[in-house]
Amino acid sequence: MSDKIPKSFDTASREASAAGEAWRLFRIMSEFVEATERMDDIRPAVSVFGSARVPAGHPYYALAEKTSRLLSDAGFSVVSGGGSGIMEASNRGAHFGRSPAVGLNIELPREQFANTYQDISLLFRHFFARKAMFVRCASAYVFLPGGFGTFDELLEVLTLMQTRKSARVPCVLMHEPFWRGLLQWIRERLVGEKMINPEDMDLIQVIDEPEGVVDVIFKHYEHRSFQPRADEREILLNL
């Protein structure tokens, strides 16, 4: 018996695979189209990131909720990952404020459960489509303590701003003791060994008080509109 795959079977297998890939691309496109249409009117918005594992009553939860409430009352839609923990706290704070609470939910095998404080709720199957939406409408970013997902999003945002693939907007880390070791390592290793430029550190601001977060965002936009300029819109099309 030959070990070779029959030519007819091999052709059918390739055709089925190609058809599957084509449908996958359509599903990805549909995620971008739906998210773009539903999020088009939420600007100005602030994307807030943090751990899904922080329980209600934890100081980090309270910090996220208060910060998001102040942002919402100041006129910013608050965009979170839509799940539990700090994501829930962020949506909760915004939900009871003046501006919409937006949740960008992701299908995961575990951990991701949609919170009930989302005024606008979207569900993604693909991380990269979801990440693009966090960036697309953000007038600023706020990072609270979190794990691998939060670090991934922080480094993604910093890379996009460093390389000018997105506008340079406020990127705030909250609760300095949590970030202290990372920032020291970045200064000593990345700056010290010339992996990044010293001025790249200016992309990051550390603020502990919720009122300070609102103030620094308004200061950044003191002499310009919250709406992206034409050149910034063009950049976003090439993320």
Image: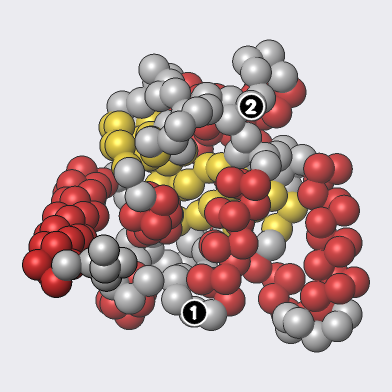
Residue 103 image-quadrant placement: top left
Amino acid type, label 1: Arg
The answer to the question of whether label 1 and label 2 lie on touching residues, with beta carbons closer than 8 A, is no
Q: Nearer the viewer, mark 1 or mark 2?
A: 2
Q: Residue at x 39, y 57 (%)?
A: 128
Q: CA distance from mark 1 to mark 2?
A: 32 Å
Against 87, is 208 above or below? Answer: below
Q: Residue at x 50, y 28 (%)?
A: 110
Q: Which residue is mark 2?
A: 53
Q: Which residue is mark 1?
A: 164
Picture coordinates of residue 54, whole percent (x, y): 66, 25
Q: Residue at x 48, y 61 (%)?
A: 221
> Would you say 170 lies left or right of 60 here?
left
Q: Nearer the viewer, residue 42 or 31?
A: 31
Answer with mark 1 or mark 2, whichever residue precedes in sequence.
2
Amino acid type, label 2: Arg
